[in-house]
Image: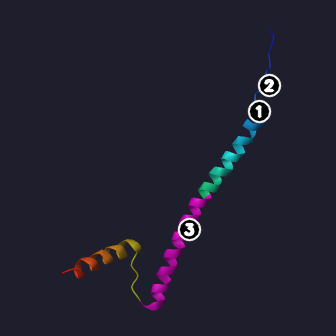
Amino acid sequence: MSTIIVPAVNSIAAGNRRPVQTLTTIFVALGCQLRIAMHIGSDLIERRFAGFAGLPYHSPVSRQQWEDLWETEEQP
């Protein structure tokens, strides 16, 4: 029995694609985590400023509900 070994076509390109895909996945995950961290940090700054100014803090969702309620009450 004899074994035939055939070199792979584009073997170098196939070997280099996997690290690039891994790096792309890592950068996308880091970007998502950075966006979440910025959102949390912004919320924390707003809360602390509201406490410093002596104003009640409303989360963005409840703030939007208050603005909608305000607009409906203004219209006769």
Q: Amino acid at mark 3?
A: Ala
Do the numbered discs 2 and 1 sit on residues whose CB atoms are within 8 Å?
yes
Secondary element at tag 1: helix
The relative height of residue 57 versus residue 2 in the rendered view (above or below) is below
- Residue at left offset 39%, top offset 78%: 58
Where residue 17 appears, as percent x and y from the top left, is: 71, 41
Q: Verify whether residue 42 appears in magenta.
A: yes
| Rendered view: 57 above or below 39 | below
Give the extent of the magenta segment: 30-54
Q: Amino acid at mark 2?
A: Pro
Circle 3 sits in a helix, a strand or a loop, which is it? helix
The disc label shown at residue 37, or none: 3
Residue density around tag 1, few if under 14, some if 14–19, many if 20 or more, within 10 Å: few
- Crowd tier of the residue under label 2, counting other residues whose Cα lies within 10 Å: few below 14, some 14–19, many 20 or above: few
According to the picture, the residue beneath numbered tag 1 turns out to be 11
Tell me the residue that label 2 is attached to: 7
Residue 62 place in picture, x, y as percent: 35, 74
